Image (cartoon, grey):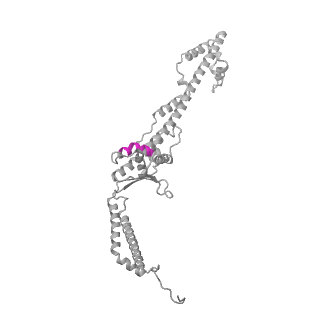
Amino acid sequence: MNANSPIQATGYSDEIDLFELAQNLWKQKLLISVVTLAVTALAAGYAFLSTPVYESKSSILPPRTADIAGYNLGRSELGFSNLTVKKVYSIFTQNLRSEGLRREFFEQVYLSGETGSQGVKSKDQFRESLNNKLSIANPDLRNNPERFAVTLQSADRQQAAQLVNLYVDLAAKKTHKDIADIVSADVSMRAKSIQARIIMLREGARKNREDRILRLSEELEMAEELGLQASQIKASRISSDGELEQFVDSNLMYMRGTKVIRAELDILKNRKNDDPFIAGLRELENQLDFLAKVSVSPDGVAVFTLDSAAEVSETPIKPKKALILALGVVLGGMLGIFIALIRSMLAKRRESVV
């Protein structure tokens, strides 16, 4: 072979001829169209035959000061600090996001409504279904960190709205119970403190009366020995501020005479109740009576502000029919072109071999 002779090309060239490629695709336009239509039909079947899913959402904000005023009735008079909006709303949001409330909602509400409509499922499957459907989130944490959204997805649009509202109501009821427990604990602690104070005062009064009786008995004996029947204290000698009388009562009680001492002694021995003579006792009893009447009623109080209640949605969020159809057309077209290219390459190989 001559070294200068040109080398004869055998086989086919690996270079892509765009014009030839376009021609081959055009020749197979029917195939591409059929594949595109088939994939689009499958996508349309999924979009229009799959079960639609609806979403309901409730938006929640903190309560106003007036909304929680019922929780603070009488607290300042009893020396308790008032419950703040921040405190009440914090308890509510903790309950709203707690696993305990979700479990309680599952047992009391969700499970009873689902068991008859979804065939045979285990309890764990129902619980997983609820966890997938229900979400509690803060949609705008940076600008509005106190706003919460409770969202639930369901094939039943009526049920979706109903379950969201029931969940929020259950969180509010649990929060009210928690606050009632706080108030009850405060009242119980204060009542025990007052009762202990009353017992101490009564015990002190009883001991003081017994000590007085002992002193009077001794002073009576002394007055009898001295023969002092009448009081030896002259009214003119008693100073205006009672200093002399106090001195006599403490040191020279026998000078009051047997008649006065015996009369006081009889009164003290026959006294059945020291309460009227205990300073501050009636005020403590009034406080105790007031504490017994303290109660927290859910009427007239609110632990959150409902910015928007969950409503029945008219438009499903899934499936997104327009998007699915568009993807079906695109993917069908790509698949058709891919099949056409493979057929063209195989045909070209066969021609080169022949």
Above or below for 313 versus 297: below
Residue closest to the eye, 173 or 299: 173
Camera sees residue 301: no
Residue closest to the eye, 298 or 224: 298
- In x, y percent, where is residue 296? 44, 39
Q: What residue range appears in magenta? A: 101-112
Magenta residue check for 269: no
Number of labels in the image equals 0
Q: From the image, which quarter does the C terminus lie in? A: bottom left
Res 107 → quadrant: top left
Residue closest to the eye, 232 or 84: 84
Magenta residue check for 102: yes
- In x, y percent, where is residue 298? 42, 41
Q: Is residue 231 left or right of residue 303?
A: right
Camera sees residue 304: yes
Q: Is residue 324 left or right of residue 86?
A: left
Above or below for 265 versus 134: above
Above or below for 221 versus 209: above
- In x, y percent, where is residue 251? 67, 19
What residue sits 64% from the left and 10% below the top? 224
